[in-house]
Image (spheres, rainbow, N blue to C red):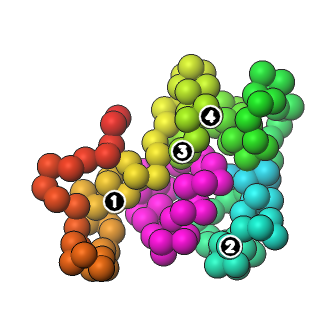
Amino acid sequence: MQEIVADTTPLNYLVLIQAADILPNLYRRVLIPPAVKAELAHANTPAIVRAWISQPPQWLEVVSLKLPVDSALAHLDAGEREAISLASELQATLLLMDERDGVTIARHRGLKVIGTLAALDLAAAMHSLSCKPCSNGCARPRSGHRFASW
């Protein structure tokens, strides 16, 4: 099992849909830089997410950067900049990120990126995702519908 570096948005949405617990089933550890923790704890973040990050699960680890963030990443938000920088520093196997600009830059830097939907798809394929019925009656993805692209 490998570790993954995560950006803010995927963690935010996984917490909101009560699916963050898929991550330790897929990855040994989830690493986040301080900026991602700060964004998850920001006053404008939903209360459930702020509560989650205030008492993070054991599988989540905040890792400080050893090197300054590359100035070429200045147009990205702080969480994206630090997540890409941390993944590069650690030569991480995977980066969990959704934002298009960040994903493009990360891939150009040789990082392998997975998004929230691909992580959910992988968890479903591994039977690590417990689906609650939706209002339209569906409880699982229809056969053949896959989000993972790697």
> Which mark lies nearer to you, 1 or 3?
3
Residue at label 4? 102
Comparing 104 with 5, the one in front is 104
Q: Which mark is residue 46?
A: 2
Q: Which mark is residue 39?
A: none
Kind of residue at disc 4: Gly
Q: Position of residue 103 (x, y in %)?
A: 56, 33
**Sequence order check, earlier mark of 3 and 2:** 2
Kind of residue at disc 2: Pro
Magenta range: 1-28
Residue at label 3? 98
Q: Quadrant of the C terminus?
A: top left
Q: Secondary structure at mark 4?
A: helix
Q: Is residue 107 above or below residue 79?
A: above
Comparing 109 with 143, the one in front is 143
Let me know if residue 93 appears in the view. Answer: no
What is the crowding at mark 3: few (fewer than 14 residues within 10 Å), some, or many (at least 20)? Answer: some
Q: Is residue 2 left or right of residue 105?
A: left
- Residue most toward the front? 136
Q: What residue is drawn where x is 32% and y is 54%?
A: 121
**Sequence order check, earlier mark of 1 and 4:** 4
